[in-house]
């Protein structure tokens, strides 16, 4: 069978059908495709572009098609190419030739752009909510672990003691920026492309504002050629997702490191670890490793869509069909990664003694010793050198800064007194009492502020969801409210 067959005399090659079909993956858009169609046909009826009775008939048919999709009663066929054609074909089976009027003043080019935008704006809300879930887990654990000291690292060398909560809240900050990026992308996703037709607009008195209001769009596209041909809004989602995955991958990497016997800071619950088929003793952090590993493929998807776009002349080109699998796979990777990391952290056990011991060893208080001299008038550069010599003495004599005899200290600078032994990890942490620092009061305040930010984010997504919940319901004609009274 050939679709849109008027100008052809022969059938398309079978291989062409297989190669060009998208129903195998774009069936995922059926709900949004039908939603867009319902509002489009309602608009056609209101504007008298098709008789209102026929519009009502089409709408009723579309609701039935929706039900058929939901119940899995649609026969998918590569010959029917994509989700748009499947919906229309089923509609025709149900209501006959009048189904052919639905596609008046519309092209699959603006239709698919519409479907993607409807789909993606919901995905953005889901993503932000999942980010908030993980942020909340980070906050809960930070709250619980406020008295736990951890070694802070640079170059993966022990550097300075920090509060474990401070370390966790660093991830909260990353995820917060991720959520902001998704929120900003939302504004550019939530634009109505319908009305662009194939590329030039349509020669019917359509009411785009009506469609936009009914579908909960914030604005309508300003240029029909742009509307059918750009997928920058997909790139924006993918790029925000790529960065979010970078953050999750870093967290995953730390989980991998921290659960080794070398570090021994963290233990994951059995539910989130896997065994080895050979080594009976193994408890592996496979989930964290896979999150790290899957990050690569999300970067790949971003690059894929960027490359997809770069050579396309205006306007629609079939290449654009290749945007969907990259997008779907990104969502299907990012969302479970967020949920799993959250669950893993919520159930992990922390070894506070080991963390505290690590935080106190490896000369992590050397900076504080230098600062001790600075407080006594020594220029920081010189204090740094003097403290370096102290470390050298310790290494030569097998001491730590805590048990190096006072004579040794004094041999390096007469400014040292016995109060130098008051420098410990807690003193070091308390001293960093500046905004953004690790001092307990600062971390408590940061935690409180973090919780407010999460609540604001959740309120925003809830507000958007409420708006979308008022969209024309597919199965209940009564719920539709006309924006024009
Ligand atoms: N499956 C197509 C896509 O995803 C739908 C639009 C088809 N338009 C066209 N002119 N062939 O892009």
Image (cartoon, rainbow, N blue to C red):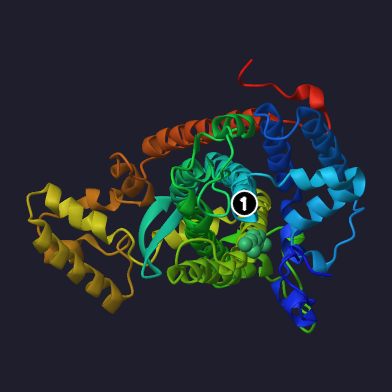
The quadrant of the image that shows the N terminus is: bottom right
Classify mark 1 as within 8 Å of ligand 1 or not, answering yes or no: no
Identify which residue, 192 or 278, lies in the foreground.
Answer: 192
Which residue is painted at 28% across and 71% down in the image?
Answer: 394
The relative height of residue 472 versus residue 285 in the rendered view (above or below) is: above
Identify which residue, 237 or 321, lies in the foreground.
Answer: 321
- Snapshot quadrant of residue 361: bottom left
Identify which residue, 356 or 151, lies in the foreground.
Answer: 151
Identify which residue, 7 or 340, lies in the foreground.
Answer: 7
Element under label 1? helix
Residue 267 in sight in this render: no
Residue 420 in sight in this render: yes
Q: Quick one: label 1, few (<14), some, or many (20+) residues within 10 Å?
A: many
Q: In the displayed structure, does residue 331 sit left or right of residue 393? A: right
The quadrant of the image that shows the C terminus is: top right
- Snapshot quadrant of residue 277: bottom right
Would you name the residue on which mark 1 appears? 116
Q: In the displayed structure, does residue 188 sit left or right of residue 3? A: left
Task: Name the quadrant where ligand 1 sits.
Answer: bottom right
Give the residue furthest to the top.
Answer: 485
Where is residue 356? Give x, y as percent.
Answer: 47, 55
Which residue is painted at 18% across and 71% down in the image?
Answer: 389
Where is residue 208? Give x, y as percent.
Answer: 56, 35
The relative height of residue 12 versus residue 41 in the rendered view (above or below) is: below
Which residue is painted at 19% across and 57% down in the image?
Answer: 370
Where is residue 439? Give x, y as percent.
Answer: 36, 41
Which residue is painted at 29% across and 48% down in the image?
Answer: 422
């Amino acid at each position: 069978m050939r679709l849109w067959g008027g100008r052809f005399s022969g059938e398309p090659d079978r291989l062409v059908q297989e190669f060009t079909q998208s129903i195998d993956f774009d069936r995922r858009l059926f709900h949004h495709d039908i939603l867009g169609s319902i509002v489009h046909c309602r608009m056609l009826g209101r504007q008298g572009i098709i008789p209102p009775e026929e519009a009502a008939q089409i709408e009723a048919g579309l609701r039935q098609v929706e039900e058929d999709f939901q119940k899995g009663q649609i026969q998918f066929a590569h010959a029917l190419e994509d989700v748009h054609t499947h919906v229309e074909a089923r509609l025709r089976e149900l209501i006959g030739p009048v189904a052919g009027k639905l596609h008046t003043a519309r092209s699959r080019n603006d239709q698919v752009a519409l479907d993607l935008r409807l789909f993606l704006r919901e995905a953005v809300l889901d993503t932000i909510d999942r980010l908030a879930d993980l942020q909340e887990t980070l906050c809960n654990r930070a709250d619980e672990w406020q008295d736990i000291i951890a070694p802070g690292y640079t170059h993966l060398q022990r550097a300075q003691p920090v509060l474990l909560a401070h370390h966790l809240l660093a991830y909260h900050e990353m995820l917060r920026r991720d959520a902001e990026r998704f929120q900003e992308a939302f504004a550019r996703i939530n634009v109505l492309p319908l009305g662009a037709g194939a590329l030039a607009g349509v020669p019917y008195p359509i009411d785009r504002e009506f469609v936009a209001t009914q579908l909960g769009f914030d604005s309508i596209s300003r240029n029909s050629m742009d509307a059918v041909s750009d997928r920058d809004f997909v790139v924006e989602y993918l790029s925000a997702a790529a960065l979010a995955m970078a953050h999750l991958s870093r967290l995953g990497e730390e989980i991998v490191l921290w659960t080794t016997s070398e570090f021994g800071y963290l233990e994951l619950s059995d539910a989130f670890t896997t065994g080895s088929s050979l080594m009976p003793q193994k408890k592996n952090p496979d989930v964290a490793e896979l999150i790290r590993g899957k990050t690569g493929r999300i970067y790949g998807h971003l690059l894929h869509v960027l490359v997809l776009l770069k050579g396309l002349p205006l306007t629609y080109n079939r290449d654009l069909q290749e945007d969907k699998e990259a997008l779907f796979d990104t969502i299907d990777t990012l969302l479970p990664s967020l949920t799993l990391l959250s669950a893993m952290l919520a159930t992990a056990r922390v070894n506070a003694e080991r963390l505290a011991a690590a935080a106190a060893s490896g000369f992590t208080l050397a900076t504080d010793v230098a600062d001790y001299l600075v407080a006594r008038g020594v220029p920081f550069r010189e204090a740094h050198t003097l403290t370096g010599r102290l470390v050298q003495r310790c290494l030569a004599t097998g001491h730590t800064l805590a048990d190096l005899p006072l004579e040794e200290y004094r041999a390096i600078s007469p400014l040292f007194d016995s109060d130098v032994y008051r420098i410990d990890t807690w003193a070091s942490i308390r001293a960093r009492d500046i905004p953004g620092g690790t001092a307990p009061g600062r971390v408590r305040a940061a935690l409180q502020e973090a919780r407010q930010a999460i609540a604001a984010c959740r309120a925003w997504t809830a507000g958007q969801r409420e708006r979308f919940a008022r969209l024309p319901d597919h199965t209940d004609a009564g719920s539709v409210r006309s924006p024009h009274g």
